[in-house]
Amino acid sequence: MTESSANKPANGEVCHRAKNGVKPGRNGFVKNHHHNHHQQPMYCYPEDKVQHTACNGSSGLGLYSRPFIESFEETPMLVAVLTYMGYGILTIFGYLRDFLRDWKIERCHIAREREEQKDFVPLYQDFENFYTRNLYMRIRDSWNRPICSVPGAKVDLVERVSHDYNWTFDYTGRVVEGVINMGSYNYLGFAENTGYCADASAEVTMKYGVGVASTRQEMGNLDRHEEMEELVAKFLGVESAMAFGMGFATNSMNIPALTGKGCLILSDELNHASLVLGARLSGSTIRVFKHNNMQSLEKMLRDAIVHGQPRTHRPWKKILILVEGIYSMEGSIVRLPEVIALKKRYRAYLYLDEAHSIGALGPGGRGVVDYFGLDPRDVDVMMGTFTKSFGAAGGYIGGRRELMEYLRSHSHSAVYAASMSPPVVEQIIASMKCIMGEDGTTLGLDRVQQLAENTLYFRRRMTEMGFIIYGNNDSPVVPMMLYMPAKIGAFGREMLKRNIGVVVVGFPATPIIESRARFCISAAHTKDMLDTALSVISEVGDLLQVKYSRHRRLPSMDRVVDHSIYDQIQD
């Protein structure tokens, strides 16, 4: 295969290229990246048929103070072929069923245009719903399950059944109790109804009520809002911060306020939909670089500087780089030291989305900047959400004071959206103070440490059992590859039968042959819970034959957890 400068791996990393399989990894390689070459990889697989290629260069060397290990084992050839065949068979049967529905042989439950409107221009093309009615409906029961408890380490599910192949659901009135929750973004375990944070929120509710009924610029600016934003700025290590009531809108409504026509946005190909929507709404020119590939990003930056805008070749007004801290579908962590180095070299701006990484990474739980030991001032726009590690709702943006003052008057989210609910604000304040230790305890830092230990333990055991898992060793988001469409629903159902709640994901949210189950590790998970879940995952994995990894399966044994996991990057 011919290598271009855009798909070569980042300088200074070790790349493992497989000799067999259907396609290369995310950047053209099957990666198991190790920055800081004095460290040995955690596991060695001497019998692996991989070709080790040392990539020379200096751009990535000296930027990492700790090992940076990510792996994306490629899809086995046979599995890829069978996956394509599975989708092909489903498509053929879908057309057959549509034919039977047209002839009234099979009942069609899908919404259709009324007969008197048959000559109107249709609201949507019928084919656009083909995937929903013929493929998604077969496994629809794997999603949108209603819960009736706090989404903590365990949840209670409302039992439902379908008598028409998932077109509609009936509730039995029974509650499935004590389901181990392996799917919620409750990274630090603050989604709870007892304890310091819950008590503080309840007290504020009694004083302020639930709603504010106004925007921040009118009658909805409470003293709790001001305190929260000051605390967020202190937590992030920036001059100022502002909060918004919705995490999705924090991206989609603020990016258009930062860039416009004549500006260039360089976006990672796996960025969240909110970043993509914000970039599109801005009217800026958008160019997409390969996921976490610094050669691809640098090439685009260099081309942007050299050639300027199309046709006129005038310099771009701004160049904004959009990246995430943890990519929620891949479990990978941004190569932030290299991104910052490129941003400084080419004088671009950096927008960092820490929705999944804030609270979940770093010795102080301050996100990916803290994880790499970097200066927060090197990131121009620091964005994150309160919906995950803090167990609340909404999002924030932090940076220089001048930037915050500008957004307060130009951001649609700040000007037109209603203020955040007081109990939600108090949940953010209480949980953030807990992480910072301002509550007088070490509970917050203990949870950050527990999450790191749980993540390493779970990922190690999953690898030992022979599953293909994606992402960084320190990422609490653990994607496990299922590949085949029939196994998406089967895995979710079999896990729930054994009282384990999981999230399964398929096309179009993932590439067509990369369906997966996504586990989210929490500090609230005890070792017994993780062992129970791992035992069930192994059992279901054997049942469905999803242990695809060609790596040697090491014996699963309990090992002493290294409590100095973050010591090597502390000052």
Image: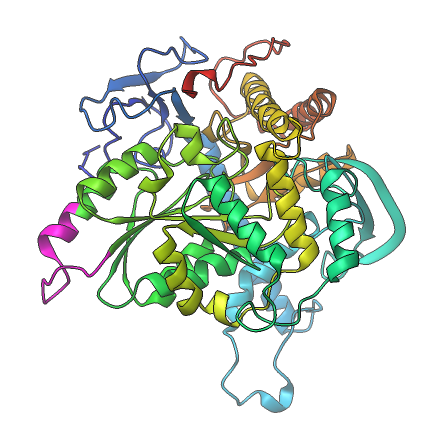
Quadrant in which residue 311 is drawn: bottom left
Residue located 55% across and 67% down the image: 216
| Residue 152 on image: x %, y % | 73, 39
Q: Is residue 121 left or right of residue 448?
A: left
Bounds of the magenta segment? 302-318
Residue located 38% across and 67% down the image: 281
| Residue 363 on image: x %, y % | 50, 26
| Residue at the farthest right position | 173
Quarter placement of the N terminus: top left
Q: How is the image coloured?
A: rainbow
Can residue 31 be seen here? The reply is yes
Residue 284 in the image: above or below residue 103? above
The foreground one among 76 and 207 is 207
Residue located 26% across and 30% down the image: 10
The foreground one among 461 and 238 is 238
Q: Main secondary structure of the magenta part?
A: loop
Can residue 520 be seen here? The reply is no
| Residue 315 on image: x %, y % | 13, 59
